[in-house]
Image (tube, rainbow, N blue to C red):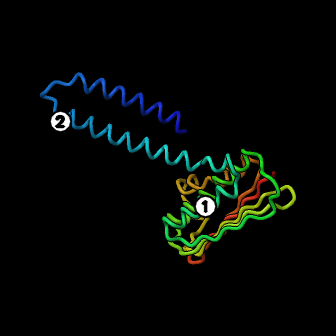
Amino acid sequence: MHDEAGQALAGINFTLETIFKTLTPDQENLAEQIIDVKKQMNRTYQEIRRISHRLHPALLTDLGLEPALESYLADSSKYSQLDIDFKMAGFEKRLDPEIETILYRIAQEAVTNAIKHSGQSFSSSLLSRVTRISILLAEDDGIGFDPGKLDNAGRRSVSFDARGCLSGGSFSIRSKKGEGTRIRIEIPV
């Protein structure tokens, strides 16, 4: 993601620089607009870089899922003032890197959604391994919602289902207005 988007932004930046060099002194307004666009592109590039590092941090590659999740959740808790309780059990050795990445991204999305939408003060996550299945439970004590009333945009924004199914897993969500949200994902390992 970072490499492809970075290359695209670099190409756009080069084109803008070429246009900027051809401007005449009477096109000062256009020059200012190009400078503004270049600043926006730089901010976009920095955000893509930040997001891509969060999606697959070096900590996940180097040390594994548990330290990476602990670090991510500690940072999320600090920046959101959200009390996050995390436990991981039943993992005697590291998982396949692809499964670790999927579980990391799902947990990351669950916390991000809780911070953005739930308005809650507490979130709990449990990642456990039972025989050949990893189970991720994420729940909050937030405002909840009616899963049956998600519009198409809302359904597309919930990508847990796609990630779980792509890895041969299953996904369920339980939520009710005023009673928080609980997500359960099972992924074979």
Task: Locate residue 175 relative to residue 133 in the image: left or right.
Answer: left
Helix, strand or loop for disc 1: helix
Q: Give percent across and percent down for residue 141.
A: 59, 75
Q: Position of residue 89 (x, y in %)?
A: 78, 65
Cα–Cα gap, marks 2 and 1: 44 Å
Residue topped by disc 1: 110
Kindly identify the residue that appears in the image at 70 percent across and 52 percent down.
64
Image location (x, y in percent) of residue 184: 71, 63
The crowd level at tag 1 (other Cα within 10 Å; few <14, some 14-19, many 20+) is many
Find disc 2 in the rendering and name its residue. 29
At 85% from the left edge and 55% from the top edge, which residue is drawn? 132
Q: Is residue 131 left or right of residue 149?
A: right
Question: Tag 2: residue type?
Answer: Asn
Residue beneath the point at 74% across and 47% down: 167
Q: Is residue 128 left or right of residue 102?
A: right
Dot 2 or dot 1, earlier in sequence: 2
Mark 1: amino acid: Ala
Q: Is residue 170 left or right of residue 159?
A: right
Direction front: furthest residue: 62
Rendered residue at 78%/51% (across/down): 94
